[in-house]
Image (tube, rainbow, N blue to C red):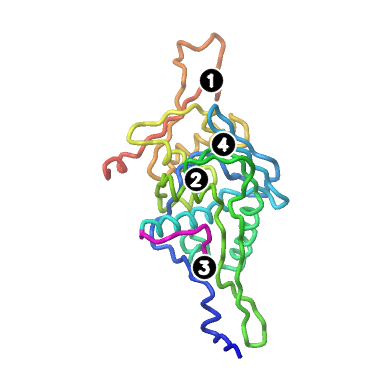
């Protein structure tokens, strides 16, 4: 007769990869390019980004496209994986973690609303389809993938007669594309501790600055920056929003300034200032350079 497992043994059906004891870090391509919707609401329209060398297509499902806030989960998983690699541990695409640790890292309160949002975010991460020509781990691929090929919530049930469910752990399987990038390419960068306190546009500006800006200033045309951010409103609207962010000095570790790309003497007669004439200059704040 087979022995029955004790309650203690039943609780140890998996080993948790959390808590995260290192800094939050991310993969460089995931920082540089617009893989997530900036909308706080439900975004159901396809998204695309294309340059001479990079193409990205994003197809939402009925629940909408994965958002920049859903990306918090991907960054958390990536950070767990990077920490394990640096500790010399073996890694697989499967990760088990507690929602409480995720909320602690990302600065979310462990409320009933947060747990509900977590479930919805996991559905969007699993349901959103991505297609890109960016190679990872020396390997390209055709077709669509989702950020998480599996996402499961494990609950325990109270034994006091109330049968209340309590979330024990989250299990996810990271997509091969990002798994290869972290495992083989090792192009990872740390995030500022205040990143999760930023709004959607500020988050993307920080990521582009972090992935593109060295000790020297980084210059980019305004419309190119708008597209790289994944900003869906008009160019003049973006310029107005960016000007406010620059004036508030709202990006951790980096300064942003907007300048005319054409000297005033070179502008055609009768031509006023246009958003398309602008360059954006991104550079590290002096205190960051001093630390280096």
Which residue lies under the disc numbered 4?
A: 133
Nearest to N terminus: mark 2 or mark 1: 2
Magenta span includes 98: yes
Nearest to N terminus: mark 4 or mark 1: 4
Residues rendered magenta in the picture: 87-99
Instruction: Using the numbered discs, state the Cα–Cα distance from disc 2 to disc 1 in whole angstroms.
Output: 28 Å
Instruction: Using the numbered discs, state the Cα–Cα distance from disc 1 to disc 3 in whole angstroms.
Output: 52 Å
Instruction: Using the numbered discs, state the Cα–Cα distance from disc 4 to disc 2 in whole angstroms.
Output: 24 Å
Nearest to N terminus: mark 1 or mark 3: 3
Q: Residue at x 62, y 44 (%)?
A: 130
- Helix, strand, or loop for circle 3? loop
Which residue lies under the disc numbered 1?
A: 273
* Among the 4 quarters of the image, the one containing residue 238: top right
Instruction: Using the numbered discs, state the Cα–Cα distance from disc 4 to disc 1 in whole angstroms.
Output: 36 Å
Instruction: Using the numbered discs, state the Cα–Cα distance from disc 3 to disc 4 in whole angstroms.
Output: 33 Å
Nearest-to-viewer mark from 1 and 3:
3
Q: Is residue 62 above or below residue 272?
A: below
For the residue pair 270 and 148, the one nearer the viewer reads as 148
- Name the magenta segment's main secondary structure: loop
Do tag 3 and tag 4 residues touch (Cβ < 8 Å)?
no
Q: Residue furthest top?
A: 269
Rendering coords of residue 160 (x, y %): 63, 88
Which residue lies under the disc numbered 2?
A: 203
Magenta span includes 104: no
Q: Residue at x 53, y 20 (%)?
A: 273
């Amino acid at each position: 007769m087979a022995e029955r497992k004790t309650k203690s043994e039943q609780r140890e059906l998996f080993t948790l990869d959390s808590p995260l004891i290192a800094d939050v870090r991310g993969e460089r391509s995931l920082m540089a390019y617009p893989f997530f919707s900036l909308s706080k609401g439900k975004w159901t329209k396809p998204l695309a980004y294309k340059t001479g060398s990079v193409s990205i297509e994003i197809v939402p499902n009925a629940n909408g496209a994965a958002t920049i806030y859903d990306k918090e989960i991907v960054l958390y998983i990536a950070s767990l994986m990077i920490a394990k690699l640096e500790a010399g541990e073996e890694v697989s695409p499967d990760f088990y973690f507690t929602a409480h640790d995720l909320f602690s890292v990302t600065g979310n309160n462990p409320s009933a609303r947060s747990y509900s949002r977590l479930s919805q975010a996991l559905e969007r991460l699993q349901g959103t389809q991505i297609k890109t020509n960016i190679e990872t781990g020396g390997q390209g691929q055709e077709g669509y993938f989702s950020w998480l090929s599996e996402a499961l919530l494990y609950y325990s049930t109270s034994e006091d007669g109330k049968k209340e469910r309590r979330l024990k752990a989250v299990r996810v399987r990271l997509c091969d594309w990002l798994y290869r990038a972290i495992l083989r390419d090792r192009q990872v960068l740390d995030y500022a501790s205040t990143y999760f306190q930023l709004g959607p546009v500020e988050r993307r500006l920080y990521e582009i600055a972090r992935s593109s800006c060295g000790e020297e200033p980084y210059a980019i045309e305004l419309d190119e920056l708008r597209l790289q951010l994944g900003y869906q409103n008009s160019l003049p609207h973006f310029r107005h929003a960016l000007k406010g962010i620059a004036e508030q000095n709202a990006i951790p570790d980096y300064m942003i300034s907007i300048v005319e790309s054409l000297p005033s003497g070179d502008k055609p007669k009768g031509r006023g200032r246009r958003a398309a004439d602008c360059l954006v200059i991104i550079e590290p704040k002096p205190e960051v350079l001093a630390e280096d």
